[in-house]
């Protein structure tokens, strides 16, 4: 039920776009940051961090989440959809690939369930999300217009994500994006282990906290946002 509510709210905000979507992004980032600084304080207690170190962590988290939120409110809404889709595909493909093939763990001391097979599946998932997005963008631009993207949307997306060799480019970009998404996941898992907590909070019944749900989305959003700004 929690997942249904989350998807419904996010989907409605994405569909409406504009100020509603911007407000939703800011609220999500704000709640995730609140959970982040709770983890930082707990880490400070568990590990005996100094006040200066705790402050540095707190400011670093504000920069990390603030940049991601700013970029996602700056780029067209379709790129917010892309960032979410890529992260969801990476998580889903990584989960099923890891469960199916198993094999060596990436970093068992941080996240015991993450395997190299899962990462490979995540790369395939990210590549598939990109191919589907590029194909949809290409058809939309050819038949319906610009999708709110500065310049020619068809040219912009193909330049940003790889040119004519779509599959090879998507796999290469997918590898980078999958690694980023997994890195975001590992980073939060590392924080939780050091803070000795299972979830970032209990705000979402059955799902932990907001930070638990957007840990992989944050670095993906930053890369996509920066690439979009460079291509504009």
Image: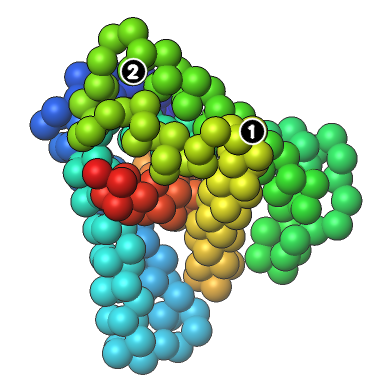
Q: Label 1's element?
A: helix
The image position of residue 232, as x and y in percent, is 24, 44
Q: Which label sits on residue 106?
A: none
The image position of residue 47, as x and y in percent, is 50, 84
Instruction: Tell me if I can see residue 199 in this picture.
Output: no
Q: Which label sits on residue 141?
A: 2
Q: Is residue 213 left or right of residue 53?
A: right
Q: Nearer the viewer, residue 201 or 146?
A: 146
The image shows residue 68, relative to residue 4, as above or below, that is below
Q: Is residue 7 left or right of residue 27?
A: right
The residue furthest left is: 19
Q: Label 2's element?
A: helix
Q: Residue at x 86, y 57 (%)?
A: 104
Q: Residue at x 36, y 91 (%)?
A: 50
Q: Residue at x 33, y 8 (%)?
A: 143
The image shows residue 156, relative to residue 60, as above or below, that is above
Q: Is residue 224 left or right of residue 208?
A: left
- Residue at the disc numbered 1: 167
Q: Nearer the viewer, residue 32 or 71?
A: 71
Instruction: Tell me if I can see residue 179 in this picture.
Output: yes
Q: Residues within 10 Å of mark 1 (few under 14, many from 20)?
A: some
Q: Residue at x 33, y 17 (%)?
A: 141
Mark before the other along the chain sequence, 2 or 1: 2
């Amino acid at each position: 039920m929690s997942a249904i509510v989350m998807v419904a709210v996010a989907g409605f905000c994405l569909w409406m776009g504009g100020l509603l979507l911007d407000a939703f992004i800011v609220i999500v980032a704000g709640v995730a940051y609140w959970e982040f600084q709770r983890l930082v304080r707990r880490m400070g207690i568990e590990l005996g961090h100094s006040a200066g170190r705790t402050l540095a962590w707190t400011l670093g988290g504000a920069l990390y989440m603030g940049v991601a939120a700013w970029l996602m409110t700056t780029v067209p809404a379709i790129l917010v959809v892309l960032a979410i889709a890529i992260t969801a595909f990476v998580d889903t493909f990584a989960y099923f690939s890891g469960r199916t093939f198993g094999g060596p763990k990436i970093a068992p001391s941080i996240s015991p369930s993450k395997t190299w097979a899962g990462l490979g599946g995540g790369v395939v998932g990210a590549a598939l999300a990109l191919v589907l997005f590029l194909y949809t963008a290409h058809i939309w631009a050819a038949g319906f217009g610009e999708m709110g993207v500065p310049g020619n949307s068809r040219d912009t997306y193909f330049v940003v994500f790889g040119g004519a060799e779509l599959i090879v480019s998507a796999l290469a970009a997918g590898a980078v994006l999958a690694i980023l998404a997994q890195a975001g996941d590992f980073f939060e898992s590392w924080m939780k282990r050091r803070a000795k907590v299972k979830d970032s909070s209990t705000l979402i019944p059955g799902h932990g906290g907001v930070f638990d749900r957007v840990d992989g989305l944050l670095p993906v959003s930053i890369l996509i946002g920066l690439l979009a700004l460079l291509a504009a």
